[in-house]
Image (tube, rainbow, N blue to C red):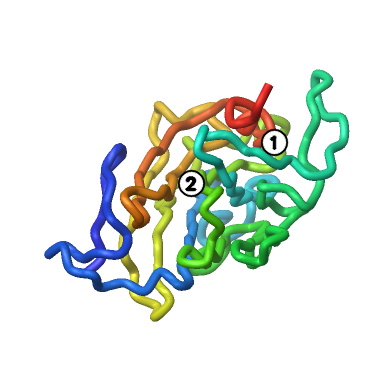
């Protein structure tokens, strides 16, 4: 049975609640989902009419080395404030670079609305095949143009991240609904997966950021 985590909790992805090897990590799906809290008048809510721009939440993954840094930013282009941003063939997986050069981790698609049940975005990781130089994967979610559209995680409910093994069995889930502490926050470091004693662990983080630009979240994970 899947384990529901609270913020800060950690579990071993391969073992079940009895400490037995139970899950197949040859392919792990990191699924993310969310709902937008409806506002506006009664008829808009009744007929599902949008009160404004659609919410476009993007899933991003940072692959980190033993120093907790992204070692390869690939080809870069100038970004805000003179910083450089990853363009492609890097250790950052996002909507403009959906597949890692190794072929061991990829984003399945960019869901621009969050509509429907189940996962809204998925990142697939072949954990058992991932090169040893990658010691941790950090999973981030950002609201595209959230600041411009005045959209933030305080308006999001039923947000979750979960891990599903190669046989379709849900291993763990971390849920996080918007509250007053999320108001004005447009990005979230949701969770991380990291190596530990030859295995993989999953940690629920839930760390919000005001920026809607994931590059600003990435900066502390890069070499200066």
Q: Nearer the viewer, mark 1 or mark 2?
A: 2
In the rendering, at what x and y percent does residue 199 appear? 34, 57
The reply to whether callout 1 and callout 2 are in contact (CB within 8 Å) is no
Specify whether residue 120 is in view: no
- Dot 2 surroundings within 10 Å: few (below 14), some, or many (20 or more)? some
Give the structural element (helix, strand or loop) at label 2.
loop
Task: Determine which quarter of the picture holds residue 121.
Answer: bottom right
In the rendering, at what x and y percent does residue 143 appear? 62, 42
N-terminal-most mark, 1 or 2? 2
The answer to whether 156 is drawn above or below residue 119 in the figure is above
The answer to whether 100 is drawn above or below residue 85 in the figure is below
- Dot 1 surroundings within 10 Å: few (below 14), some, or many (20 or more)? few
67 horizontally vs 93: left or right: left
The answer to whether 70 is drawn above or below residue 18 in the figure is above
Which residue position is annotated with label 1?
149
Q: Which mark is residue 63?
A: none
Give the structural element (helix, strand or loop) at label 1.
helix
Residue sitting at x 49%, y 28%: 183
Which residue position is annotated with label 2?
135
Return the residue nearer the eye: 118 or 92: 92
Residue sitting at x 56%, y 61%: 123
Residue sitting at x 58%, y 34%: 69
196 horizontally vs 28: left or right: left
In the rendering, at what x and y percent does residue 46 appear? 51, 61
Return the residue nearer the eye: 40 or 196: 196
Return the residue nearer the eye: 40 or 81: 81
Task: Determine which quarter of the picture holds residue 74.
Answer: top right
Residue sitting at x 66%, y 66%: 103
Q: CA distance from mark 1 to mark 2?
A: 36 Å
Residue ranking furthest to the bottom: 167
Residue ranking furthest to the right: 77
1 horizontally vs 122: left or right: left
């Amino acid at each position: 049975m899947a384990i529901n985590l609270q913020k800060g909790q950690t579990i071993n992805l391969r073992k079940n609640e009895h400490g037995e090897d139970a899950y197949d990590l040859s392919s792990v799906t990191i699924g993310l989902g969310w709902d937008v809290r409806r506002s506006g008048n009664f008829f808009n809510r009744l007929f599902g009419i949008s009160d404004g721009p659609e919410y476009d939440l993007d899933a991003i993954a940072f692959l980190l080395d033993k120093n907790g840094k992204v070692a390869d930013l690939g080809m870069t282009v100038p970004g805000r404030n003179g910083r450089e941003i990853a363009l492609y063939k890097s250790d950052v997986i996002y909507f403009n670079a959906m597949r890692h050069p190794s072929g061991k981790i990829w984003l399945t698609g960019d869901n621009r609305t969050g509509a429907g049940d189940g996962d809204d975005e998925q990142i697939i990781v072949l954990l058992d095949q991932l090169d040893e130089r990658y010691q941790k994967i950090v999973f981030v979610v950002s609201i595209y143009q959230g600041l411009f559209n005045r959209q933030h995680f305080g308006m999001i409910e039923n947000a979750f991240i979960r891990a599903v093994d190669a046989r379709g069995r849900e291993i763990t889930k971390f849920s996080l609904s918007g509250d007053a502490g999320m108001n004005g926050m447009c990005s979230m470091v949701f969770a991380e997966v990291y190596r530990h004693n030859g295995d993989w662990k999953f940690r629920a983080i839930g760390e919000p950021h005001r920026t809607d630009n994931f590059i600003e979240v990435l900066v502390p994970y890069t070499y200066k």
